[in-house]
Image (spheres, rainbow, N blue to C red):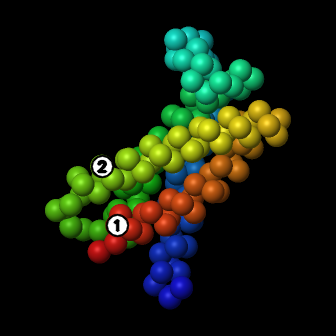
Amino acid sequence: MNRKKLKQFLRFSIINGGLGLIAGGITLYILTEYVNLGDKFPELNSWLIKTLQIKDVRTDDLLSSTIACLVGYAVGFFVQRFWIFKETKHGKSSKKFVIFIAISILFLLINDTSVCLLEKNLDIGVWEAQAITTIGIAVLSYLTSVKIFAH
């Protein structure tokens, strides 16, 4: 890895990861500690249980984790585009945003599935499951972001 790519990776890891974790972490904390999403959306709650075939996972944790990831991804797009990859051209920004969102949705599915499986199979809480999952997704995110924002 050359010096420029190493600096870029470190900026991505520290700044994008840090801001995404802070934004997502605050969101996750507020939603899990003060808002019970499972009670507010019972139809979605039952749909998730039927769809995922997992009965022991708290769907309010899953919904909170999903929203927290979306917040982190939204912060990530702008940080990556303007600061990490220093993109100033606006010509392909809408196409890049669509690609970024599509990949983020895939990562979100991976995130939710992983959080559910880790919570259930390792008997750990949502915070631990989210932390483990975030590490794996961060590596995948960097590799795909390099391709999206490459000049």
SS label for mark 2: helix
Q: Mark 2 highlights which residue?
A: 98
Horizontally, is 127 left or right of 143 in the view? right
Residue 38 sits in quarter: top right
Q: Which quadrant holds the N terminus?
A: bottom right
Of 130 and 52, which appears nearest the observer?
A: 52
Looking at the picture, how far across and down is residue 84, in whole percent? Answer: 42, 68
Q: Which quadrant holds the C terminus?
A: bottom left
* Residue type, numbered disc 1: Phe
Give above or below for 45 relative to 67: above
Q: Residues within 10 Å of mark 1 (few under 14, many from 20)?
A: some
SS label for mark 1: helix
Please identify the residue farthest to the right as the structure is shown: 123
Asked whether residue 45 is in view, the answer is: no
Q: Mark 1 highlights which residue?
A: 149
Q: Number of marks in the image?
A: 2
Looking at the picture, how far across and down is residue 41, in whole percent? Answer: 52, 14
* Residue type, numbered disc 2: Val
Looking at the picture, how far across and down is residue 35, in whole percent? Answer: 59, 21
Horizontally, is 146 left or right of 90 in the view? right
What residue is drawn where x is 56% and y is 28%? 63
C-alpha distance separating marks 2 and 1: 12 Å
Q: Residue 37: which numbered mark, if any?
A: none
What residue is drawn where x is 30% and y is 49%? 98
Q: Earlier in the sequence, mark 2 or mark 1?
A: 2
Asked whether residue 137 is in view, the answer is: yes
Of 27 and 122, which appears nearest the observer?
A: 122
Q: Residues within 10 Å of mark 2 (few under 14, many from 20)?
A: few
Give above or below for 52 relative to 41: below
Looking at the picture, how far across and down is residue 78, in whole percent? Answer: 37, 55
Please identify the residue farthest to the bottom as the structure is shown: 2
